[in-house]
Image: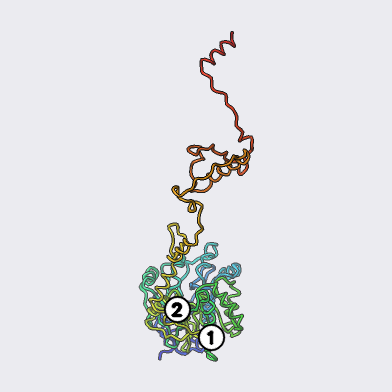
Amino acid sequence: MTSFSDLDLDPKVLEAISEAGYTSPTPIQEQAIPHALVGRDVLGIAQTGTGKTASFTLPMITILAQGRAKARMPRSLILCPTRELAAQVAENFEIYGKHHRLSMALLIGGVSFKDQDKLIDRGVDVLIATPGRLLDHFERGKLMLTGVQIMVVDEADRMLDMGFIPDIERIFGLTPFTRQTLFFSATMAPEITRLTETFLHNPVRVEVARQATASATIEQSVCKHAPSRKDRSETEKREVLRRLMEAEGEELRNAIIFCNRKRDVDVLFKSLQKHGFNVGALHGDLDQAVRMRVLSGFRDGSIRFLVASDVAARGLDIPNVSHVFNFDVPIHSEDYVHRIGRTGRAGRKGRAITICLPHEAKYLAQIEDLVKAEIPVVESPLGGGEAEAFRPEATDRREKEGKPSRSRRGERKPRARKADREEAQATEPVTAEAATPEPEEAVAAPAPAPVPAKQEAEERSSEGRSSRGGRGGSSKGRGGKGGGREAPVIGLGDHVPAFLLREFKVKPSRSRSEAEQEEEDATA
């Protein structure tokens, strides 16, 4: 078996490794370190928990042992996707480089710019940063990247995700073309591999295991649960989680519980806390001081269970995690490999349990297709017809039933049954028109009695209002044509003044000859 002494590392680095308790390198370390020491670009792919961080930190310390950093010009740069991973890489450098006088700076969000500027002004050999904070310092004129000799991208598949590509391209453009570049990740999709060809020059591809495979020391299972009612799915899901945790007994020393959304992290955290579990929460919206305090508490054992988003799924090295629970099935199948990789690290045994509801079955199928294995199914603690609910035809039927019919304007249009329509017609009140007999059946009515003038005015006013209201009303009476009665006054509401209803005489118009005769008499 190869030992670290066979890898041509600096003697002081070997001393630090021995003091840390490591005796032999992992496969990824054994293959990647020699290429990195001779200055080759490396594309490293390995399972989580196999020591990828040491694969680039050990050769970097050996190479940087000679030389001195200049102010504001770091000699090496390590990019990490999350603050927690960046802080963890910094801790590894402190362990492996404690016998060297290499300076280091950690640039992450949530920390004062002033303190970070002081470290950069002194000159740093190793700069560990997240892309956003690194560009903030550069735009403020506090940092130059023209002196970078070695550049590392940790968790490359996440860093090269759609949201990070513009920042990564810009940072690479600020570094020298002659730099040495190292990419490390647990997964590397083909389209991401093509992207790395832009950044790496004739790289050595080191792949110690098939991509997207979990460690053999992790026992995986999935608990399929069909809720009794749709509105109780989240409540029952939390109860399933609690019962699964209780069923593990003493084997459950601690666990990380992953949720897809930050909101679900907060809800589940409060629920477990309410039921007496020693739990902490970790997601991207928390302050950096809170995140570091929670993570530190989980590492030292003061916090037993950690409810987290995918911010804790990448690269965090907490060796003694016994269990990982996927409260939500990850939408991106690659995230499943990273999540369960938080347990079963460094050859230890671990257990990963995923809770799957019927609407998440499609994501579970994608995961099984990625890992090229069928995950064993365990019975739901709450029981129920899981097998029937998770059949493909049942899933398709639920999706079709879940889509309501819509009208042309996008409004929901309820569908009435034929029996309901017939019942509605049977119970519909009879209108005045329907109650009126046919003309031939009508009986001759007596002549109406004389109506007083005031009552007649009120009747005429009400008739005018009825003729104006409604869409189905007749146009007669509006223009005064064909109605047989005078058109009512519009705009006075229910009350019409009596003077408007009085009849008045109009003088007859005179002929032109009479008007001329009167004019001649007046001028005579």
**Residue wearing tag 1:** 243
Rendered position, 78 above or below 352: above
Residue 111, visible in the rendered structure: yes
Q: Position of residue 200 (x, y in %)?
A: 39, 71
Quarter of the image where one finds residue 263: bottom right
Name the element at disc 1: helix
Q: Quadrant of the C terminus?
A: top right
Residue density around tag 2, few if under 14, some if 14–19, many if 20 or more, within 10 Å: many
Q: Position of residue 37 (x, y in %)?
A: 42, 79
Rendered position, 160 above or below 456: below
Name the element at disc 2: helix
The residue closer to the viewer here, 217 or 5, is 217
Amino acid at dot 1: Arg
Residue 53, visible in the rendered structure: no
Marker disc for residue 336 = 2
Marks 2 and 1: which is nearer the front? 1
Pick whichever of labels 2 and 1 is earlier in the sequence: 1
Marker disc for residue 399 = none
Rendered position, 380 above or below 496: below
Cα distance, mark 2 to mark 1?
A: 22 Å
Rendered position, 72 above or below 473: below
